[in-house]
Image (cartoon, rainbow, N blue to C red):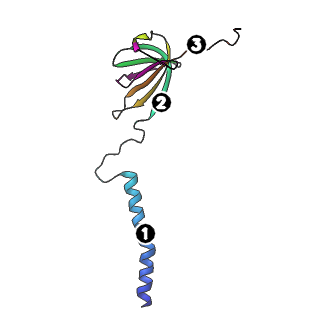
Amino acid sequence: MPRILRVALLLGAILPAVLSAQSIYRTRHGAPGTPNLPAYKDVAGSFHGKIKSLTKKEIMIETEDDQTVSMRVSGKTRFYKGNEPIKASDIDMETLVTVDASEDADLKLTAINVIVNLPPKNSDSK
């Protein structure tokens, strides 16, 4: 009887460790045969710069460090001047904007909000 008790206690101690190790593997690497999708899918970011091109399908801005960023424009893209909604056609080239973007499943950027940067108000005016 003591031998059966020892085997049962040993199995009770080892079995949970073995089972939990298998579940960690599956959660980290997915089920066998499934692709490993990147962890950064749908990450949002903000870009600040001057508009170089604006069409119904694409917005291209040049950032302050001379990088050109191209993003898709969709039906969900919203355009603002301050807090007021505007049309895309109301924005001139070389206008400073901030663009909030998300990354699609195909790893391309899509503009969510395009905000025209208003010039700072002078506090010297009386």
Q: Percent x, y for residue 76?
A: 37, 26
Is label 2 in contact with label 1 (beta carbons under 8 Å)? no
Magenta stretch encompasses residue 5: no
Q: Which residue is mark 3?
A: 119
Amino acid under label 1?
Pro
Residue 98 percent location from the top left of the image: 50, 21
Count of marks, rendered view: 3
Q: Which range of residues does the magenta coloring cover? A: 64-88
Residue at the spot of label 1: 16
Q: Residues within 10 Å of mark 1 (few under 14, many from 20)?
A: few
Q: Label 2, label 1: how many angstroms apart (C-alpha)?
A: 42 Å
Task: Give me the residue at 55% from left, 15% from top.
Answer: 118
What's the residue at 41%, 82% (across, down)? 7
Residue 45 marker: 2
Residue at (37, 56) in percent of width and height: 26
Magenta highlight on residue 71: yes
- Please, what is the three-letter code of the amino acid marked with disc 2? Gly
Q: Split into 4 quadrants, where in the image is the C terminus?
A: top right
